[in-house]
Image: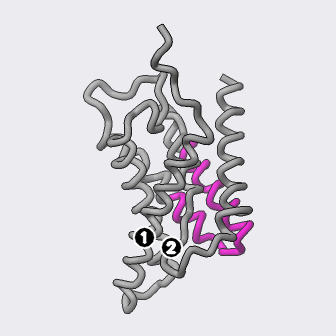
């Protein structure tokens, strides 16, 4: 159990460091601003306590705010994402529920499930983040295009990070 917690802690720290040291310094355009640190909330085990997920979300968001000097906007967006995670998991749950041996990743749950799960949470995060950042509806369509484009690129990064953080199970072993 302790080794699993240390593995998740290492993965979360790795995701945060990649976000603040590499991805934050990439300039793709004004409309594409990826925030793959959301994956740190998405990969938490299914059986993680709801309150603990909220605490993790807050701490992850505060750590991004600390590095970016953004005074709480990432913390509030990550907290909303952590809150919505429970309801999205409930919505996309299999008929028999989640097995304790599987993780909320593409390898274990499949691409279709992950697109719905991660795509929904990334859209929630980005919608809140970018509209709260703009804080006006006069630029509704410009901000909406930022939300959509950034969500697609963020999803791509999250999908790519799974290949770096997890090993694909060997299906040929008998």
Image point 34% across, 41% down: which residue? 113
Q: Is label 2 in contact with label 1 (beta carbons under 8 Å)?
A: yes
Q: Secondary structure at mark 2?
A: loop
Quadrant where the N terminus is found in the figure: top right
Q: Which residues are magenta?
A: 52-79
Q: Earlier in the sequence, mark 2 or mark 1?
A: 2
Q: Is residue 100 left or right of residue 68?
A: left
Q: Residues within 10 Å of mark 2 (few under 14, many from 20)?
A: some
User: Compared to 131, does 171 lie above or below?
Assistant: above
Image point 33% across, 27% down: which residue? 97
Helix, strand or loop: magenta stretch: helix
Residue 4, image x, y percentages: 65, 28
User: Compared to 129, does 1 lie above or below?
Assistant: above
Q: Secondary structure at mark 1?
A: helix
User: Disc 2 designates what residue?
Assistant: 32
Residue 55 part of the magenta segment: yes
User: Disc 1 designates what residue?
Assistant: 149
């Amino acid at each position: 159990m302790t080794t699993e917690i240390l593995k998740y802690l290492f993965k979360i720290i790795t995701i945060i460091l990649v976000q603040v040291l590499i991805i934050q310094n990439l300039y793709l355009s004004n409309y594409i601003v990826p925030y793959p640190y959301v994956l740190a909330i998405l990969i938490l085990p299914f059986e993680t306590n709801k309150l603990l997920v909220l605490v993790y979300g807050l701490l992850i968001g505060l750590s991004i705010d600390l590095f970016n000097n953004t005074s709480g906007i990432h913390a509030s967006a990550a907290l909303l994402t952590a809150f919505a995670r429970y309801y999205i998991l409930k919505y996309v749950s299999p008929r028999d529920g989640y097995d304790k041996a599987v993780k909320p990743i593409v390898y274990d749950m499949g691409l279709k499930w992950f697109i719905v799960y991660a795509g929904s949470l990334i859209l929630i995060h980005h919608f809140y983040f970018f509209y709260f950042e703009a804080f006006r509806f006069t630029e509704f369509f410009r901000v909406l295009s930022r939300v959509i484009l950034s969500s697609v690129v963020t999803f791509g990064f999250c999908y790519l990070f799974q290949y770096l953080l997890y090993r694909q199970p060997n299906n040929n072993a008998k």
